[in-house]
Image (cartoon, rainbow, N blue to C red):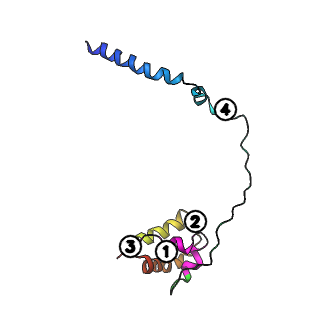
Amino acid sequence: MSTQRLSRLHSARALTFIIPAFLIPGAAALLTPAATVADKPFVFQSVHVTLPESDRTFPGPGAEAINNNCLACHSAGMVLNQPAMTQAAWQAEVNKMVSAYKAPAAAADVPAIVSYLVKTKGAS
C-alpha cells in the first residue's frame, strides 16, 4: 500500500471517531457560543460569612511583631502547624505575604517576624 493511500486511510478513520462525537445528544450546547447561552445577566449578591474566632496568639518572647501583623489574616494555629523551614524560606514567605498579598506588615517588623518563625518553626 502506498504512503499516500495509508495517509488517506488514517484520515478517514480519524473522521469516523470525530464525527460521531458531534452527534452525541447535548453536544450542540457545548458548541453554542456563550453569548447565546447566557440569557440572564450575572447578578452579584451579598452573602454573610461567619469566620471562626480565636483568642489564640503566638506564644513566647519575641511574638509581639507576629501577633501585631499576622493575626489579621492567619490564625496562630495555622502558622504554627506549617512545616519547619530555613531562615531563607521563612524570609521568602514573609516577603511574598507583603509583596504579593499586600499584607500590612510594617517593614521594620519583618526581621522580627522572620526571627520568631525561625526560632519556633525553623529547620535545622
What whole-number distance in Å separates the C-alpha atoms at marks 4 and 2? 38 Å
State which tag comes first along the sequence, 1 or 2.
1
**Secondary structure under the numbered disc 3 in the rendered image:** loop
Q: Quadrant of the C terminus?
A: bottom left
Q: List the single residue furthest toward the front.
A: 25
Magenta stretch: give its range. Answer: 65-87
Q: Residues within 10 Å of mark 3 (few under 14, many from 20)?
A: some
- Residue labelled with disc 2: 102
Residue type highlighted by circle 3? Thr
Q: Are marks 2 and 3 in contact (CB under 8 Å)?
A: no
Q: Position of residue 120 (x, y in %)?
A: 45, 79
Q: Amino acid at mark 1?
A: Leu
Closer to the N terminus: mark 4 or mark 2? 4
Give the percent coordinates (x, y) of residue 95. Answer: 49, 68
User: Which residue is the site of mark 4?
Assistant: 37
Sequence-earlier tag: 4 or 1 = 4
Image-based side of 66 in relation to 36, left or right:
left
| Label 4: element kind | helix
Mark 1 and mark 3 in contact (Cβ < 8 Å)?
no
Q: Which of the two marks, 2 or 3, is nearer to us in this view?
A: 3
What residue did someone put label 1 on?
Answer: 80
Q: Residues within 10 Å of mark 2 (few under 14, many from 20)?
A: few
Name the residue at the left extreme: 1
Q: Is residue 49 magenta?
A: no
- Residue drawn where x is 61% and y is 29% of the image: 29
